[in-house]
Amino acid sequence: MNNNIYPLVSIVIPVFGVEKYIEKCSRSLFEQDYPDIEFIFVNDHTTDNSIKILESLIKEYPQREKDIYIINKQQNEGLPQARATGLKYCHGSYIIHVDSDDWVEPNYISSLVQKALESKAEIVWCDYLIETTTQSEQIINNYETDSQIEILKKLLTGEFHSAVWNKLISKNLYTPETEFTRFNQLEDLVLTTQHFLNAKKWAYVPRLLYHYRINNTSLSFSDKRIKKRCYEEYYNFKKVLHYLKKKNINLSELEPVLSNRINGLKMALLKYPENRDFEEIKSFYPESIKNLYSLHAPFLGKFKLYLFAKFNLKIIYKLLDYIHR
């Protein structure tokens, strides 16, 4: 196969606790109409039968077998680090990440590669469907612009989904400085922000090619998980802000979007005593307080954040903790 016509694509698929879904995911990948693909399955120390099911399934696709790799990790480190492990084994000109409980259309890879070659884009994305047990919801990402600032704004608001699984990425965008976070919340935003800060050209394929599964169990969170989630989002967004500053992005051009996101994170953190490092929170992009008025949030929450930022009134939160005992 002439690699000038069909550049090699590496697909990284982390595997953990997906014995119910791994077959559908893998079949959809092995049955792609694109010829030159290598499949990097990363066993994130799963304890179920996912890998056994995968190994059995591989035998049904002898034409793909030589291009399928299973990387076994010695301990579970979570999705971002599993992706990082898989990247070390990629030889392709392009990288795609697929979640092992999702599935894709047969022309998923070929459509994205064709667009990349035609447009010389380093990032190509497509539309997708959110799949639950009862319905499918179409998500259209027809946001096209040559402006890096506009793309970054849409990423920060969530209007343009930061997910890595509906995006074909040139391997050249993965540099020795590319960082995979250790926390799951906003981990896609951490990686995708780095890609768009380094890319010169991107493109969009207006087709529904990816099926993103949401399990009903993932829709409800205990109070403990919400607290953990708040901290992880805060930690990872600090990384995003670091990348923006490192690339000398004019942060004022991202306002009030940037401040709204940061103020929302601060308000969420301050709800939970165990998440409160007051000095740390206050020093995190203090400029955000100037745009507090534009944040869509309850007045009382914004007022407390204003007092905290202006006067460092820790006593407010300690008093509220006492009242709510």
Image: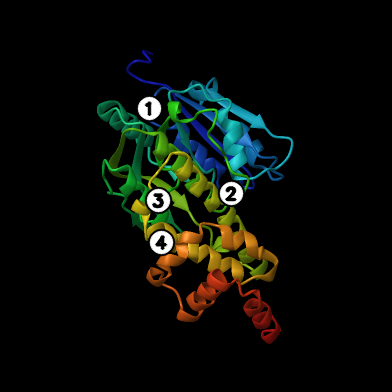
Q: Residues within 10 Å of mark 4 (few under 14, many from 20)?
A: few
Q: Is residue 125 left or right of residue 49?
A: left
Q: Amino acid at mark 1?
A: Tyr
Q: Is residue 218 left or right of residue 276?
A: left
Q: Is residue 78 left or right of residue 40?
A: right
Provide the secondary structure element on which disc 1 rests.
Answer: loop
Residue situated in front as seen by the camera: 62 or 206: 206
Q: Which residue is mark 2?
A: 20
Upstream in sequence: badge 3 or badge 4:
4
Upstream in sequence: badge 2 or badge 3:
2
Is residue 58 positioned above or below 313 on the image?
above
| Spot occupied by residue 246 in the image (x, y as percentages of width and height) | 48, 40
Provide the secondary structure element on which disc 2 rests.
Answer: loop
Marks 2 and 1 sit apart, C-alpha to C-alpha, by 26 Å
- Identify the residue at image location x=26%, y=30%: 119
Residue situated in front as seen by the camera: 15 or 270: 270
Q: Residues within 10 Å of mark 3 (few under 14, many from 20)?
A: some
Is residue 34 positioned above or below 28 on the image?
above
Upstream in sequence: badge 2 or badge 4:
2
Provide the secondary structure element on which disc 3 rests.
Answer: helix
Could you say which disc has been placed on residue 139 in the image? none
Marks 2 and 4 sit apart, C-alpha to C-alpha, by 18 Å
Upstream in sequence: badge 1 or badge 3:
1
Q: Amino acid at mark 4?
A: Gln
Marks 1 and 3 sit apart, C-alpha to C-alpha, by 41 Å
Q: Which residue is mark 1?
A: 34
Q: Residues within 10 Å of mark 2 (few under 14, many from 20)?
A: few
Could you say which disc has been placed on residue 251 in the image? 3
Upstream in sequence: badge 1 or badge 4:
1
Could you say which disc has been placed on residue 135 in the image? 4
Q: Are marks 2 and 3 in contact (CB under 8 Å)?
A: no
